[in-house]
Amino acid sequence: MSKFRTTEISNPEFESNNLRFITVKTSNLKGRGDICVFVPPIKNLQDTPIVTLLHGVYGSAWIWTHKAGVHFTALKLMEEGLIKPMILAMPSDGLWGDGSAYLPHNEKNFENWIVEDVVNAVIENIDCASEKSDLFIAGLSMGGYGALRLGAKYPKKYKAISGHSSITNINQMKFFVEENEANYNQEKSINEDVFQLMLQHKNNLPSIRFDCGADDLLIDFNRTLHQKLTSENIPHIYEEFKGKHEWSYWQEHIKDTLLFFNKTIT
């Protein structure tokens, strides 16, 4: 039985580039949510790993594919034998304001939308996915914050997590959005700091990596996160590359995330 009141999925006759589109109605959003899904064009796949890719501010479910071509990158890596087949699930953030930050607020639960609904929608609608599929989560900017925070908060759910040019605390949303920070702080029990969550779950964390461009406006925050994790002996990989807070950087370095995840696929 479906976990959703309504589900719409694209007709294969009109799909292209191995992309499928799913819309489900969920109580977490008090309405509908969209997911763009890359399904590897490989026969007889079973229990295929699911990688949830979170976008940044201003974007939606289409943006990882149509501004970074991530589906082409993933397929090329598969064809070259560098990564095993994996599904890419690319949801909207819930389309609140300039960005929901993937937190519960304003009577909607953008967190549960990601950790529950997106995975369930893929398992229900994509034949090669199942309850046995390994789960991974990654993102850029606000999406990097979502991936690192949710991966740390739900350490038993995800096998590995990765962030690109990540916000590391909700107070950094002010650099990008017009909405007041108070909107994101309505759930007092929610821990909005990536490091504090990783420290809290220090002994149970999934594999962690994150990177940032040397000329990114968030570089100091990422360096600080790296330094704090190192001081607490929390295993992680941190890398810096040339680049700014821009799509050309994320298009290039999403490969690092996919290769990293591939190492932990059973």
Image: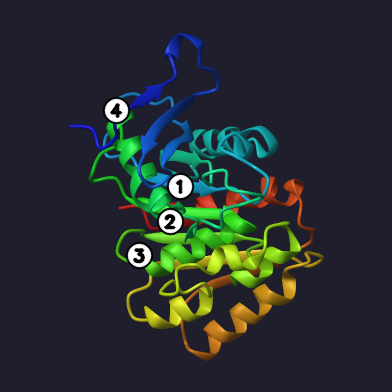
* Between 56 and 157, the one nearer to me in the picture: 56
Counting residues from the N terminus, which is met first, the one under dot 3 or under dot 2? 2
Q: Residue furthest bottom?
A: 231
**x%, y% of residue 215?**
82, 65
SS at badge 1:
strand
Left or right placement of residue 165 versus residue 261 in this view: right
Residues tagged 3 and 2 counted as in contact (Cβ below 8 A):
no
- Please say if 198 is above or below 44: below
Residue 154's label in the rendered image is 3
Residue position marked by numbered label 1 in the rendering? 52
**Do tag 4 and tag 3 residues touch (Cβ < 8 Å)?**
no
Front: mark 4 or 3: 3
Residue where numbered disc 2 is placed: 111
Q: Residue at x 36, y 60 (%)?
A: 159
Q: Which residue is mark 4?
A: 127
Task: Determine the CA span between mark 3 and mark 2.
Answer: 11 Å
Q: Amino acid at mark 1?
A: Thr
The disc, 1 or 2, on the residue closer to the chain's N-terminal end is 1
Q: Viewer-nearest of labels 4 and 2?
A: 2
How far is disc 1 from disc 4 in space, using C-alphas?
A: 17 Å
Q: Residue furthest right?
A: 215
**Distance (Cα) linking label 1 and label 2:** 13 Å
Which quadrant of the view contains residue 76? top right
Mark 2 and mark 1 in contact (Cβ < 8 Å)?
Answer: no
**Could you say where residue 252 lies in the image, as x and y percent from the top left?**
69, 48
Nearer to me, 88 or 4: 4
Mark 2 residue element:
helix
